[in-house]
């Protein structure tokens, strides 16, 4: 996740279609967290493979009014940093929900995801290449991605599923490594407040909400294979520690995003509510304190020359 996409709403969250790759790979991690991350990697495979009934594409396109809000605003923030025809790497790109519209508009896109079933669905678009791989090692056999290959790299999901700061920094540094100097890395996180409110947890139980809000630790009974929830400051600090400069953290959906989870996309009021929520999200994107009211935040930074 590594992760498989942009999951994590309400918790229950070129190559002509050629599929290549080497699998998700295994990574050594410091301390006692390795076994825990291995279990998370297995849960990611289960959750996003279709066996769980989860459909990441539907979440962003048809499940509720929140999905299009998140998708539209994410695309806006990405495209502000892309020159025409830019080469883009979408890591954790799932079924191509972001890669496909970028490719349709002339961007040269490579999608990488750890879940083979997601990659196969992405390849069906036929407008970009899709490979199996892991955000923590983009040089692995089957990916073989070298330094400075891309104008922009997207991590719209991998950080959700990496429990340790070291692993998240590894993914961020790999993204920076394969991005040309002056290029862009965009990395998303699920916010702590969204995790708490969206999950419907017992707010009066300190043993539940304190680990989420203070440490970003998910509850043990959460269905979504979350490893870590961010706040905006932490995500920005991780991006900067990974070597990115001029980092700006945006709230993606804005303060109205969570409410749209409860609005069906075919409801008569949905278009007007999405427009209103977009207006708020754009106006308050970086206002101090407000990004943490979004369900997702994204740190956008520049790779140093």
Image (cartoon, grey):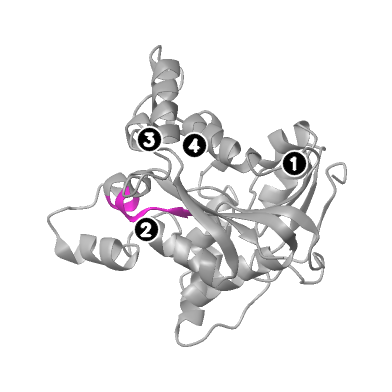
Q: Of callouts 1 and 4, which one flags the residue occurring earlier in the amino acid sequence?
A: 4
- Circle 4 is placed at which residue position? 70
**Start-end of magenta stretch:** 189-196
Q: Of callouts 1 and 2, which one flags the residue occurring earlier in the amino acid sequence?
A: 1
Callout 4: SS? helix
Residue drawn 78% across the image and 37% down it: 84
In the image, residue 24 sits, relative to residue 273, either above or below, namely: below
Circle 4 Cα neighbour tier, 10 Å, few/some/many (<14 / 14–19 / ≥20): many
- Circle 1 is placed at which residue position? 83
Q: What label does residue 126 carry, if any?
A: none
Q: What label does residue 257 carry, if any?
A: 3
From the viewer's perspective, is the residue at label 1 or at label 2 nearer?
1
Q: CA distance from mark 1 to mark 4?
A: 22 Å
Circle 3 Cα neighbour tier, 10 Å, few/some/many (<14 / 14–19 / ≥20): many
Q: Nearer the viewer, residue 62 or 191?
A: 191
Callout 2: SS? loop
Whether residue 111 appears in this view of the structure is yes
Residue drawn 38% across the image and 30% down it: 280
Q: CA distance from mark 2 to mark 4?
A: 17 Å
Q: Of callouts 4 and 3, which one flags the residue occurring earlier in the amino acid sequence?
A: 4
Q: CA distance from mark 3 to mark 1?
A: 29 Å
């Amino acid at each position: 996740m590594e992760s498989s996409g942009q999951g994590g709403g309400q918790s229950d969250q070129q190559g002509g279609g050629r599929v290549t790759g080497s699998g998700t790979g295994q990574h050594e991690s410091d301390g006692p967290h390795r076994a825990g991350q291995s279990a998370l990697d297995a849960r990611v495979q289960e959750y996003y493979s279709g066996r769980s009934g989860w459909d990441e594409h539907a979440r962003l396109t048809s499940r509720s009014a929140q999905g299009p809000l998140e998708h539209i605003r994410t695309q806006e923030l990405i495209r502000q940093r892309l020159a025409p025809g830019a080469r883009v790497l979408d890591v954790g790109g799932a079924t191509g929900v972001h890669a496909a519209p970028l490719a349709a508009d002339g961007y040269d896109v490579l999608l990488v995801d750890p879940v083979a079933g997601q990659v196969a669905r992405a390849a069906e678009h036929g407008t970009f290449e899709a490979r199996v791989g892991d955000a923590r090692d983009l040089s692995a056999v089957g990916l073989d991605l070298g330094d400075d290959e891309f104008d922009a790299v997207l991590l719209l999901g991998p950080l959700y599923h990496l429990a340790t700061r070291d692993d998240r920094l590894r993914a961020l540094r790999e993204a920076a490594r394969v991005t040309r100097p002056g290029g862009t890395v965009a990395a998303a996180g699920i916010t702590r407040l969204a995790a708490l409110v969206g999950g419907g947890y017992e707010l009066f139980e300190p043993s539940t909400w304190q680990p989420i809000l203070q440490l970003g630790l998910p509850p043990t009974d959460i269905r979504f294979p979350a490893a870590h929830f961010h706040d905006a400051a932490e995500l920005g600090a991780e991006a900067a520690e990974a070597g990115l400069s001029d980092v700006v953290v945006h709230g993606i959906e804005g303060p109205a995003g969570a409410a749209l989870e409860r609005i069906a996309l075919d409801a008569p009021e949905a278009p007007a509510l999405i427009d209103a929520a977009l207006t708020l999200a754009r106006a308050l994107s970086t206002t101090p304190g407000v990004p943490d009211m979004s369900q997702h935040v994204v740190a956008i930074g520049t790779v140093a020359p």
